[in-house]
Image (cartoon, rainbow, N blue to C red):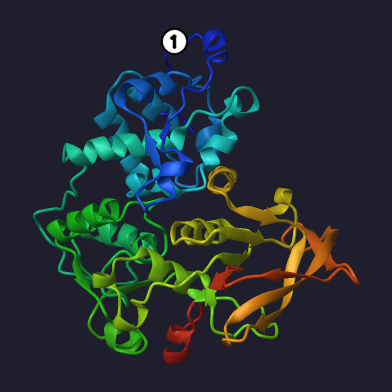
């Protein structure tokens, strides 16, 4: 796997001593008062300085091996170090159609592969990707190019989240006619209706949607495939169909009291709290009353998003209740650090076993059992085991369940022979 830029004379002995430049970030005291983006990223000078830390490792470059998209990271960082920001954005865009999104919210697996992570800290590849993507957007340098001659083929894309957007762009570039079907009132899927604005400003996504519209992609919203129109009906109208509906069905814990008022599934809570009312269905427009005390059950990035959202809605005390230790948490450690800075508490080795209502009928208390870790399970993480006689109670005015999600069965139930 050779980088686009195969050889540049760099003094690795000097570069390995360079400490991270540090990107711009709003203070915790300021940012908890609104839903604006927390990470301000780099300016041009800081970006070039941070990118100049890259050692331009010989093949195989560990950052590229760690990136699921196969981005040519050394080439992009070289361009950034030379203040060639548009060229860097084009390198990222060659393998990733959403650099402005991935730079903000991907788990930065490339940085885990960076050899500098073992010393002063990895190069901030994600933040640099977001910076150059924003620069390119402002310069209108990443416009989608479509062929003048069309193929005559029609493609239906079900779902307008990151997968659907990617396929729509790839298909329109090939000259096909593309129609994207979306259940929500606006395109964007989880990028609009799932990820909070303080992590991914919705205008970033809307710019991308507009680029697709300008390229000729058609979006049909408020349409549930499998209910409003079937897959079989689409097969009669289109030459190919891509199903990219995501994992929008939230898992339940199936414990007593889970249906009490004041207990939310994570997606429902995030949609109501983070999305502008004018692009929400009427039944989702009520912002949750979080009260003073909030408990979030789970340990992934969604649980962290919910906890940080509750803080911004005015909760005075927010607990993330997680049944394993920090070492087993599946979420981004950087997001977890930001969460703690904002005042969220994380209660490790604990799990709820029952909810109780107060006098008003809403959830008031969670019964929790302490856990210990046993042998690894199928996920490779050590299995949590309840400790007998360790029950305790945690008062909460609102509880949010963020313990995983799966695909909506609507498509398989309405389409003969379809398996997901």
Picture mark count:
1
The front one of 30 and 21 is 30
Q: Is residue 281 above or below residue 326?
A: below
For the view shown, which residue lies furthest in the front direction?
A: 359
Residue 244 in sight in this render: no
Coordinates of residue 188 in the picture (x, y in percent): 31, 64
Coordinates of residue 87 in the picture (x, y in percent): 27, 30
The structure residue drawn at horizontal position 48% and vertical position 42%, both measured from the top left corner, is 28
- Residue carrying label 1: 9
For the view shown, which residue lies furthest in the right direction?
A: 388
The structure residue drawn at horizontal position 71% and vertical position 50%, both measured from the top left corner, is 326
**Pointer 1 local density, CA inside 10 Å: few below 14, some 14–19, many at least 20:** few
Secondary structure found at label 1: loop
Horizontal side, residue 411 vs residue 210: left or right: right
Horizontal side, residue 392 vs residue 225: left or right: right
Coordinates of residue 242 in the picture (x, y in percent): 35, 71
Q: Is residue 373 above or below residue 282?
A: above
The structure residue drawn at horizontal position 59% and vertical position 47%, both measured from the top left corner, is 340
The front one of 62 and 367 is 367
For the view shown, which residue lies furthest in the left direction?
A: 148
Residue 328 in sight in this render: yes
The front one of 105 and 55 is 105
Residue 410 position by quadrant = bottom left
Horizontal side, residue 78 vs residue 169: left or right: right
Horizontal side, residue 20 vs residue 256: left or right: left
Coordinates of residue 184 in the picture (x, y in percent): 31, 75
């Amino acid at each position: 796997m050779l980088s686009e830029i195969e050889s540049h004379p760099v003094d690795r002995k000097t570069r390995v001593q360079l400490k991270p430049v540090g990107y711009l970030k709003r203070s915790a005291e300021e940012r908890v008062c609104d839903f604006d983006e927390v990470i301000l990223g780099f300016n041009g000078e800081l970006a070039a300085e941070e990118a100049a830390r890259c050692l331009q490792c010989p093949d195989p470059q560990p950052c590229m091996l760690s990136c699921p998209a196969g981005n040519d990271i050394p080439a992009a960082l070289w361009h950034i170090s030379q203040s060639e920001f548009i060229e860097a954005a084009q390198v990222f865009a060659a393998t990733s159609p959403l650099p402005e999104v991935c730079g903000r919210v991907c788990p930065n697996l490339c940085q885990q592969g960076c050899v500098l992570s073992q010393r002063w800290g990895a190069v901030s590849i994600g933040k640099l990707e977001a910076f150059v993507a924003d620069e390119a957007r402002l310069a209108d340098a990443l416009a989608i190019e479509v062929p003048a001659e069309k193929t005559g083929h029609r493609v239906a894309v079900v779902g307008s989240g990151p997968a659907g957007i990617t396929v729509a762009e790839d298909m329109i570039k090939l000259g096909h006619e593309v129609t994207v079907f979306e259940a929500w009132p606006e395109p964007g899927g989880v990028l609009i209706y799932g990820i909070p604005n303080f992590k991914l400003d919705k205008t970033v996504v809307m710019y991308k949607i507009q680029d697709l519209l300008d390229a000729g992609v058609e979006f049909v919203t408020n349409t549930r495939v499998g209910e409003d129109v079937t897959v079989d009906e689409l097969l009669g109208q289109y030459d190919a169909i891509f199903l990219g509906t995501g994992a929008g069905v939230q898992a339940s814990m199936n414990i007593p009291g889970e249906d009490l008022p004041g207990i939310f599934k994570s997606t429902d809570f995030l949609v109501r709290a983070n999305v502008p009312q004018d692009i929400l269905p009427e039944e989702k427009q009520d912002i949750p009353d979080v009260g003073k005390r909030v408990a979030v059950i789970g340990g992934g990035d969604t649980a962290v998003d919910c906890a940080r959202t509750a803080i911004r809605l005015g909760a005075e005390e927010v607990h993330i209740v997680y049944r394993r230790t920090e070492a087993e948490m599946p979420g981004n450690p950087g997001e977890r650090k930001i969460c703690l800075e904002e005042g969220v508490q994380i209660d490790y080795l604990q799990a709820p076993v029952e909810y109780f209502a107060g006098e008003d009928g809403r959830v008031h208390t969670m019964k929790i059992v302490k856990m210990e870790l046993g042998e690894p399970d199928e996920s490779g993480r050590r299995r949590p085991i309840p400790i007998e006689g360790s029950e305790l109670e945690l008062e909460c005015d609102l509880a949010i369940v963020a313990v995983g999600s799966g695909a909506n069965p609507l498509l398989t139930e309405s389409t003969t022979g379809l398996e997901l």
